[in-house]
Image (cartoon, rainbow, N blue to C red):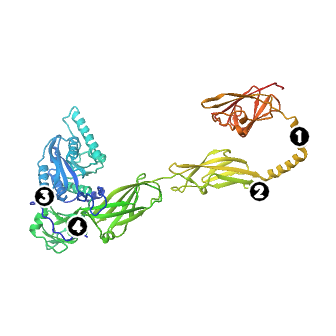
Amino acid sequence: MYKEAKKVKKWENESSSMKNMRKIIAGILGCLIGFCFWVGNTGTVAAGYDRANRMNVIFVLDESGSMSGTDSHQLRYEAVDLFLGIATDTGNYMGAVAFDDTIVQKEDIREITGKVSKNLLSDSIRGAQSYGDTDIGKAIELATQMLEQNGDNGLSSAIILLSDGNTDLPEDTMGEAMAASAARKENAIASARKNGIKIHTICLNANGQAKKEELQEISDATGGTCVEVKSAEDLKDVFSQFYGMIYSTDTIKLADTVIPEGGELEIIFDIPMIGVEEANIIINTLNANTSYNLSNPSGYGYTQAEMQNMEIKARTFTVIKIQEPEAGRWKLLVRGVAGDQVTIDMVYNSDLTLEMESNVSGSIPLGSDVELTVRLFDSGIAVTDETVYKNYSFYLMAKDIKTGSIEEKEMEPDGDCARYILQPGKYGDLEIQACCSIDSMLVKSEKVFLSVENTAPVAIKTPIIVNRMVTPFSEDIFTIDLRKYITDAEDTELSYRISYSEFDDDIAFIDYFQLNIRIKECEKGGLTVTAMDSEGESIEVDVQIKTQNLFSIIMSVLMIIILIAVIVPALLNLKKSSRMIRGRIQISGYTEEGFVGAPETFDGNKGKMLLSRYINFKENVGINLAQTYFVAGEKVSYIYLVSRVGYYTDFTPTDRSKKIRIDADMEINISSDIDFGKGIKVVYIPNEINY
C-alpha cells in the first residue's frame, strides 16, 4: 500500500541565499532526452532501489577573463545553486572544476548530503574566479579523471560544461599548447565514451562572438546535449532543463500570473499517489518580501518556522522542498503586492523503479508469444494496488534495431502488474523497454533484447513432376504456380529463378511466381528452381518434365505393325551380316587434376561394346560407363560412341551429342562438362582400313 501522510523533513541547517532569474526560454524543454532507469531482478524489494534517480555529476565552469563580460552578474553560480537545490538531499555525488587556461579550482567529487554539503560546494565554486585564457581540453580531461577515480561505480555519470567560447590560447605562438589541449580533449572524449559519461554543454553567447562548434562536438561525441544561450539570465532555465534530462523528470507549470487584488494568490496542485520522493516548488518573483504558506491534503498547515526550514530563498526566487510529500491535493498561498508577476513551477524527485519480466530470451522463432510483465516499485516496495495499474499508463517501446523504427504497445492492467503479449510479425532484432508515465514522471525499465530468427524457404513438395499427354488440342504453355510448392515463414513473397535447365530459355522460363513450360516443344528433361527470401535464404526444388505425344504414339504403333509384318524377315538376314568393330580402342580418363591411371586398350571384334565391361576408373570422370557403348560404323575406318544422355566433344564443344563418330587414328575428347573439366580421351586404331 502507499505511504500514509508524512511530515516533511527539516533541512539540516539554515537556508543560504541563491541568486536566480525568471525563466525566459521555455521552448528548449522539449528537445532534451531523459536517461533510462535501470532496475534489478523482481522480488518484494527491488534491487538497487535506493540508487534510483541518483547520479555522479561534475560542473565544469569557464572562469576566463571574458566571462566577466558575458556573465557580469555571475548568474552561472545561481544556476548551479538551483541545480543543487532541486537535487535530492542524499545519494548524489557531485564535484566541480573551474578553469581558464589553468585549473583554477577543483572540488573532488563526493556525496552531497543536505543543505550544508550543497552550500559548501556552492561557496567553493563561487570563490573560483580568474581572468586567464580558455583551455577546454584540460578541464574536461580532469573531470573525466575525477569521475573514474572517485565517482560512485554504482551510479551513472554526467558532466555539465559551461563556456562562452572555444579553446583560446593567444600566447601560444608555437601551437604547442593548442595541440596539447586538443590531445587532452580527445582523451576526455575517449574516457567518457568508455565509461558511459555524457557531457552536456552550454555555449554562453551573450556577445554574439562565441563559436559553438567545439562544445557541440564534445556533446555529440559523448551522447550529450549542447544548448546555446544568448543571455546569462537564461542559464537557470538551461540548468533546470539539464536537471530534468539527467534525472528523468519534467518541470510542471503551476502558475504564470500576477498576484490579484487583496495580495493573496492561491495555487492548488496534486501530488501523485506514488513515486514522489521530493517535490520542489520553484517560485520566481521580483519582490523579496513575498511570503508563502503551505497546506497538505490532510489540512495540516505548516508554520513559518517549518516553512523557513523547507525554503531556499534568493533575491528573485524561492525553492520549497517537500520531502516524502503526502499524496493528494495541496494548497500554496503566495502573499505579496497586488500586480507582482509570479511564476511557479514544480519538479519531482522520483523514487520509482520499473521491472520487466519476459517468458523468453535470446533467439526466438517467428510467431512466438512473448509475454512481458511489468511491476512498479515505490521506494523499493512492490506496488500491488490494482488501481495504480488501471489509472496510469503502462506501455512498451519495441524498436527494430535494423530499421530504427519504434512501435508503442499499450499494456493491459492485470491485478498487481501490467501485461502484454507481443507477437513479432517479422524476423530481425528487437530492443524492448517498458515505460510508465505518472504525471510528469517517466519511469523506464531495463531493455530486453530479442532476436527473431529468419528461416529459409521450405518445399511443400519436391520434386515437382510434370507428366503430360500432348494432343493437337493441348495448350501451348503449361503453367505451374510455384507458391503452391514453396513457402516461407517470414516472407509472403519470394523471388524465383531457374538455376539449371536442360531446356532452352524460351522453352522453360519464370514470370514472377509462375514457371511456364512450352509443353508441345519439350519431350523429357529436368530443371531446378531456386526460391529466395528477402534475406537471401534459399532452397532448390527440382522439376521433372515428361511429355507424350498422342499422335506420335499412334504412328509408333502403326510402324511397329509394319515392322513386324514386313521388315522382320529382312532384319533376320541383316543380323547375319551385322557389322563388328575390327580394331583396337584406347581410352584414357582425366579430371582437372590430370589423367586417371594408365590408358586402357582393348580389341574389338564385337558389334556393341559397353564401356563398363572393359574399364573401371578409380575416380569419377563424369561418364556413365554403364549407359555408354561403342558400335561399329558403316565402314571399318570409324566407329561410334553412343550414350543415353549425350556428351560434348572437341568438335561439338557447345552441343551435346548422343552419337559421336570417332575416326581412325583420331584423338577425341569426350566430356559431360562443357568446360571439359573431366571426361575421357579416345583413340580408335582399326586392324585394316577399307575406304
Find numbered disc 4 in the image and state the secondary structure of the residue it sits on: strand
Q: Earlier in the sequence, mark 3 or mark 1?
A: 3
| Quadrant in the rendering for residue 281 | bottom left
Q: Earlier in the sequence, mark 4 or mark 1?
A: 4
Mark 1 sits on what residue? 572
346 or 352: nearer the eye?
Answer: 352
Asked if residue 269 is positioned above or below residue 185 in the image, the reply reads below
Mark 2 sits on what residue? 473
Q: Is residue 175 left or right of residue 121?
A: right
Give the label on residue 115, or none: 3
Q: Earlier in the sequence, mark 4 or mark 3?
A: 3
102 or 189: nearer the eye?
Answer: 189
Q: Which residue type does callout 1 highlight?
A: Leu
Q: Which residue type does callout 4 highlight?
A: Leu
Q: Which residue type does callout 3 highlight?
A: Lys
Q: Which residue type does callout 2 highlight?
A: Phe
Give the label on residue 254, or none: 4
Q: Position of residue 14 (x, y in %)?
A: 9, 60
